[in-house]
Image (cartoon, grey):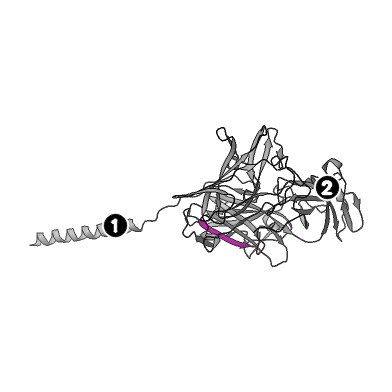
Amino acid sequence: MLKTKSITIVIILLQLTVQVYAQKKKKKRIAIEQSPKQELVYDNVNYLDAIKTVQLFPTGKENQLPIYTIGEPELLELSFDDLRADVRDYYYNIEHCNADWTPSRLSVLDYAEGYNEDRIVDFKQSQGTTTAYTHYKTVFPNEYVKPKVAGNFLLKIYEDSDKERLILTRRFYVLKPLVVVESQILASSFTEKRLSNQKLNITIKTGLTISNPHRDIQLHVMQNQRPDNMMILRTPMFIGTSEIKYNNSETLDFMGNNEFRYADLRSFKGGSAQIMDIQMDSLVHMRLFTDQDHYDDTYATTYDENGKFYIRNLDYDNADIGSDYADIEFSLQTTQNIAGDIYLVGGYNNYQRNANNKLKYNPNSKKWTVRQKLKQGLYDYEYVLETKEGKVITNAFSGSHFQTGNDYQILVYYRRTGTYWDELLGIGTTSINNKQNKN
């Protein structure tokens, strides 16, 4: 009898052990593989293919140049999607840079208030999409991350508070408004360029005592926020007691280029005039109608957003997490003898040229094609040619016209005598020939 009771007790203990082990095994968390370590680049970079649709702009001013003015209440808003679709701990900090985007010699204590690190706590997962993703959003400056000097800054987003596990970096600007910028746009001073170019004259006014404007002041002028279409000017034509003029007839003479091409991807159900066909299975696939080479064409009035993109959704509410992704095929047909590489660029990829947006020639269709993974919305884009010598021709397939609508951004940098960093003391904007937008 005693032996039987002992056996029963042993069996019960074994059952309890198995149950406890099973419960522990069931509760075991699935480990998420960390993002790999990356080498920092002082540019707008997505370090992982899974990071998409990065936007950084002043709150309420979608797709405007990301500028924070010291002492003003307006903040900057960052958002992005992670197509790995899990939930990760992302942190961010900022670093001060020189006007040429090299790191400045200022220490973090000199350029930032607070801890200079904060965690992104606002995230939502996609709803009802074929491509799952997690949407992250944050606003700054705040009590933890706040710049206290003017100039160029790099925003760095990284995983698990490990600054080497970068997922993206974005450039932004901090302004201390001590300079007023005035500008005008004219036709080119050169007769042969009057129908194709747009020439800027700029005057800056300030109460500062600038001992040597040739050495201490530099202007950076961008067309449509494009880092690949920027001119830097250091030599003024006139220096007065309170104003400096930059109106040399041979400087700041930009090609007008042409209006951007655009793709309306707001609906994956109804399509749009740019979409040739849509295939929907486990993912969404689209082909756009083939773009033609407009290099020798006369100017035609069309509407564009000067290179910007906007996330919009006509199918469902809440574009941030209800918009789907699709593989979009772009194609270009040209009879030019191409000596170099063709890239598809726009605000959506910061006009950068890499293997992801490089076109390939299809000898069967005699077209150049590339596929891009894009979120529902409106996208401006164009094709640029990079020659074998490394020269980028922005109008290679579009031509250039004075009538083109463009925005220009003028940034005034100042390096005070005896200092070793560049401050941003003035920003001006001007436009020409813009038409009503389609957004």
**Label 2 – label 1 distance at C-alpha:** 72 Å
- 57 displayed left or right of 219: left
**2 or 1: mark nearer the eye:** 2
Query: Can residue 188 be seen here?
Result: yes
Q: Is residue 136 magenta?
A: yes
Q: From the top left corner, tell me how far across and down residue 62 is, in percent.
A: 65, 60
Callouts 2 and 1 close, C-beta under 8 Å? no
Q: From the top left corner, tell me how far across and down residue 336 is, in percent.
A: 67, 34
Residue type pointed to by label 2 = Arg
Which class describes the residues within 10 Å of circle 1: few (<14), some (14-19), or many (20+)? Answer: few
Q: From the top left corner, tell me how far across and down residue 196 is, in percent.
A: 79, 44
Q: Nearer the viewer, residue 330 or 53?
A: 330
The answer to which image quadrant residue 13 occupies is: bottom left
User: Please, what secondary structure does the residue beneath circle 2 have?
Assistant: loop
Q: Nearer the viewer, residue 303 or 101?
A: 303
Q: Nearer the viewer, residue 208 or 293?
A: 293
Q: Which region of the structure is painted magenta?
A: 132-150
Q: Nearer the viewer, residue 425 or 184?
A: 184
Residue type pointed to by label 1 = Ala
**Image quadrant in which the C terminus is located:** bottom right
Residue on which disc 1 sits: 22
User: Please, what secondary structure does the residue beneath circle 1 have?
Assistant: helix
Q: Which residue is pictured at 50% across the width and 52% down the height? A: 83
Q: Residue 141, relative to residue 293: is it above or below?
A: below
Query: Can residue 49 be seen here?
Result: no
Q: Which residue is pictured at 63% across the width and 59% down the height? A: 116
Q: Which mark is residue 394?
A: none
Residue on which disc 2 sits: 234
Q: From the top left corner, tell me how far across and down residue 90 is, in percent.
A: 54, 56
Q: Is residue 142 magenta?
A: yes
Outermost residue toward the bottom in this view:
73
Q: Which residue is pictured at 83% across the width and 47% down the height? A: 234
